[in-house]
Image: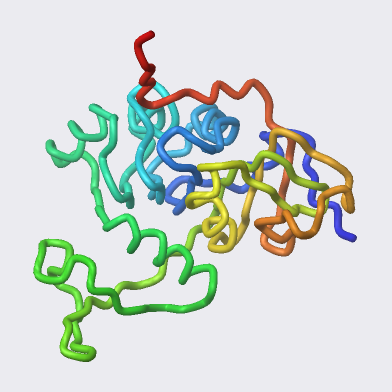
């Protein structure tokens, strides 16, 4: 069985260059590839097109890449809690392609499945549909949306094995599994890395065939976007 393990995040990101298209998994701040984002900051690659559910917050996640002006274009489903993302969008400094969340998820899934386009009713008759082909099916109008693929996909899993098989926990299953299938090179960072054969095959969410590099991450902050507690 092929061992996909690399020794650290530096080795995992070899080959990342200016101008590339990157997918970054997670949902809000949950299940994001924290180690890979920090390495992108360190190496200073720029003119990136980043595909992600959102852009994190101002001082964490993709928000850090925006602060350093490393991102040329964001393909996302909402601005979220990131004031800098909003500022760059409104000022025209950043090219932004906003998608309905389900459309974004399906475009990524289509990229991983080799489906170049599909039709969806979401966004028809709105700004989302401007310039896109539309077609009627069974009396209802649909927009044609194209697949999304990336040069590198960076995903974060709870547990993985040396063959690249991955298990996600909770909300981290949003976007990470589909992004793992849609990158030319998929890099997985995991909280726990175990030998091949130790994971229950029935629990695996991403088969190792989709993963080219895997490493054990460290020092996860796991921030909460909006912490809400109940008064006693």
> Residue 206: image x %, image y %?
66, 57
Q: Position of residue 149 (x, y in %)?
A: 47, 63
Which residue in the rendered view is the most extreme toward the top?
232
Q: Quadrant of residue 211?
A: bottom right
Q: Nearer the viewer, residue 64 or 46?
A: 64
Residue sitting nearer the eye, 189 or 205: 205
Quarter occupied by residue 189: top right
Q: Nearer the viewer, residue 45 or 181?
A: 181
Position of residue 70 relative to residue 106, above or below, is above
Q: Residue at x 68, y 42 (%)?
A: 12
Q: How is the image coloured?
A: rainbow
Which residue shows up at 25% across the image and 28% down it? Answer: 84
Q: Residue furthest bottom?
A: 138
Residue 210 on image: x %, y %: 67, 62
Quarter of the image holding residue 148?
A: bottom left
In which quadrant of the rendered image does the C terminus lie? top left
Residue 169 as seen in the image, left or right of residue 124: right
Please tell me how many numbered marks the rendered image carries. Answer: 0
Question: From the viewer's perspective, is 151 left or right of 141?
Answer: right
Quadrant of the frame with the N terminus: bottom right
The residue drawn where x is 28% and y is 30% is 82
User: Residue at the spot x=85%, y=52% of the render?
Assistant: 3
- For residue 176, above or below residue 215: below
Q: Tell me residue 147's x, y (percent).
A: 40, 70
């Amino acid at each position: 069985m092929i061992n996909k393990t690399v020794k650290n995040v530096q080795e995992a990101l070899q080959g990342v260059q200016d101008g590339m298209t990157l997918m970054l998994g997670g949902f809000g701040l949950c299940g994001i590839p924290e180690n890979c984002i920090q390495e992108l900051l360190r190496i200073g690659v720029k003119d990136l097109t980043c595909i992600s559910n959102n852009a994190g917050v101002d001082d964490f996640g993709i928000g850090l890449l925006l602060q350093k002006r490393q991102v040329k274009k964001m393909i996302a489903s909402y601005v979220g809690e990131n004031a800098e993302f909003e500022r760059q969008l409104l000022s025209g400094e950043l090219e932004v392609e906003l998608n309905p969340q389900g459309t974004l998820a399906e475009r990524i899934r289509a990229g991983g499945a080799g489906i170049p386009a599909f039709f969806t009713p979401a966004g028809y008759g709105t700004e989302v549909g401007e310039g896109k082909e539309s077609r009627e099916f069974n009396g209802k109008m649909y927009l044609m949306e194209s697949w999304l693929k990336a040069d590198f996909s960076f995903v974060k899993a709870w547990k993985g094995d040396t063959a690249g098989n991955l298990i996600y926990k909770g909300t981290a299953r949003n976007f990470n599994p589909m992004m793992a299938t849609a990158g030319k090179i998929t890099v997985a960072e995991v909280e726990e890395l175990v030998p091949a054969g130790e994971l229950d095959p029935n629990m695996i969410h991403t088969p190792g065939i989709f993963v080219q590099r895997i490493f054990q991450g460290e020092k996860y902050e796991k921030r909460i976007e909006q912490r809400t507690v109940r008064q006693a």
